[in-house]
Image (spheres, helix red, strand yellow):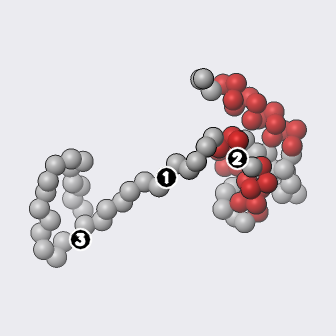
Amino acid sequence: GTQLAGKGEQIIPKNDLLIFETPGGGGYGNPMQRDIRKVNEDFVAGLISRKKAEVLYGVVIDELNQTDMPATEALRQSVLLRRPA
């Protein structure tokens, strides 16, 4: 299909289809401070992968689907230390 300009006006001909996609919200708060139990619940429910739990939330989930607390605390600390203030 035809791409529209990011700004300005354009006439959409009758019977043409306009698809308007907007990005979702970024959420509220620092993901590295999200409740660890909630991250694990999302993983168990299949909403996020084990890798995304680590990369996005700093939560390490083991092979038994349990949160590895020492590894999680170490990962979150290392991420926070690398981030600019």
Q: How far apart are marks 2 and 1 (CA)?
A: 16 Å
User: Disc 3 residue type?
Assistant: Leu
Amino acid on which the number 1 mark rests in the picture: Gly
Residue neighbourhood size for the residue with mark 3, other residues' Cα within 10 Å, grouped as few (<14), some (14–19), many (≥20): few
Residue annotated with mark 2: 34
Please tell me which residue is depicted at 18% across the width and 71% down the height of the picture: 16
Disc 3 is placed on an element classified as loop
Residue at image point 21% right, 47% down: 7
Q: Mark 3 and mark 2 in contact? Answer it, CB < 8 Å.
A: no
Name the mark nearer the viewer: 3 or 1. 1
Q: What residue type is labelled 2?
A: Arg
**Residue 72 horizontal/vertical position (percent):** 81, 40
- Marked residue nearer the N-terminal end (2 or 1): 1
To which residue does mark 3 refer?
Answer: 17
Q: Which label is found at residue 77? A: none
User: According to the image, label 1 marks what residue?
Assistant: 25
Point out the image quarter for the C terminus.
top right
Work out whether residue 27 can be spotted.
yes
Image location of residue 43, percent across then percent down: 73, 59
The quarter of the rendered structure image containing the N terminus is bottom left
Name the residue at 70% across, 47% down: 34
Q: Which of marks 3 and 2 is in front?
A: 2
